Image (cartoon, rainbow, N blue to C red):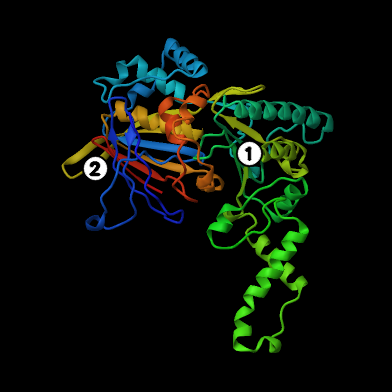
Amino acid sequence: MGFHPHLPVPSSQRQLRGAVQWSSFSRPFMTSHGSFPESDIPPSENTELPADWSIKTRLLFTSSQPFSWADHFKAQEEAEGIVQHCRGAGTALPRGLQDPKLSTELRCAFQQSLIYWLHPALPWLSLFPRIGADRRMSGKASPWSEDETLQRTLMNDWSVSFTSLYNLLKAKLCPYFYVCACQFTVLFRAAGLAGSRVATALMSPTTRGVREAMRSEGIEFSLPLIKESGHETKASGTSLGHGEEQAISDEDEEESFSWLEEMGVQDKIKKPDILSLKLRKEKHEVQVDHRPESVVLVEGANTFMLLNFLINCKSLIAASGPQAGLPPTLLSPIAFRGATMQMLKARSVSVKTQAVSGYRDQFSLEITGPVMPHALHAMTMLLGSSQSGSFSAGLFTHEPTAVFNVCPPLDRAPAKGTVPEELARCGLHPETLDQLSRAPTLGRSALRSVEMSDYSCSWRS
């Protein structure tokens, strides 16, 4: 089945809506347009539901049809779901299921979509999210906090797992993974995903200290949101040496005072000295610290340098507090060395809601845990089949990761038709892989809600 090109969507746009038509394979096709009044909506073209690279902490699906098929799995169904996941097998579901509760394929596919892989795994601790988790983890047992030998052991195991994940990603056997530290999150993506033909890594939020440390290690990077807003960073890793940076600063200074020469008053105006300009630049860099604008983009071979930087970075692990001595959380859609298989939690509920003609049944399905992009797409496909093309979904985003929807440079786009073939063994369903291979269109926002009616879907960010 063919694809249609994306419509351009500004990164600052806060709302997206769309119309989706589902094929016999339950594939979502959406028409994306801006937030116009209904009478002003321009003609639309078919395009896919936008990929969302943020991590969701909770999904709440509601429907007029029950979710009873998502409860009380048989041992065989659970086993089949795990096997399908480990083998990367996809399931073709029809557009509408007459009785979802009797569909073994649906129930196995749902089990498959709930699986994710994590390191480290400590049953008494919830290791996602890590940013802002001190209060939640306070008072929990942490035998490593005062034991340096145990801390070194945990860090050595973590380094092995992190390196294993990166090697899988480089070989295009892992599509993406997250490194969730107590102060920042890093998303590593394989070459061919998110509209880039090279491997990419996004890190957010960052501070000037971290960025300076990355520069000193020779890591080239850019600040995509700073450039988008019209401010030149002039500090993209090592691409500019000290002399080059100074030359550009002098050049900019001359340009900024050129209009005074035209008026003939340049000698009467005191120009700021080099120190003042440097302090002003440093102040601007500090102003974006801990904010979405501080997101860093690393590309190509520099992602390997970032791997080494993170393994040796002292600020990667908290020195005090409830998270002291605990390595960052690694989250992946596929297995890797030292990983533990985990399941998202699913719970279905039925309630009575008041309607014009009295009361009616309203059914809901709640998913909690670190919901990664592939799982969100898989569940959207499944529910299109199980709920006869009608449901609503509230999506709760881990806010520090919403900025991961920023679009990488368009000149890095892969050759047409190469992505599915090169990433065919990465463990994702072909439909999900197609979606995640496209350049992000949500900018610095994330999907907040999805509503499907009669197999047509709208979304809001």
x, y percent for residue 436: 46, 35
Callout in the foreground (2, 1) = 1
Q: Is residue 431 left or right of residue 195?
A: left
Q: In this view of the protein, can residue 122 be seen by the observer?
A: no
Residue at 25% across, 50% down: 43
Considering only vertical position in the picture, is 99 above or below 284?
above
The front one of 319 and 172 is 172
Considering only vertical position in the picture, is 276 above or below 363?
below
Q: Secondary structure at mark 1?
A: loop
Question: Which of disc 1 and disc 2 is earlier in sequence?
Answer: 1
Q: Which mark is residue 168?
A: none
Residue type at numbered disc 1: Gly
Residue at 65% across, 30% down: 166
Q: Is residue 96 left or right of residue 424?
A: left
x, y percent for residue 391: 30, 36
x, y percent for residue 385: 30, 26
x, y percent for residue 351: 31, 35
Residue type at numbered disc 2: Gln
Q: Which residue is mark 2?
A: 354
Disc 2 crowd, CA 10 A, few/some/many (<14, 14-19, 20+):
few
Quadrant in which the N terminus appears: top left
Q: Which residue is mark 1?
A: 300
Q: Residue furthest top?
A: 76
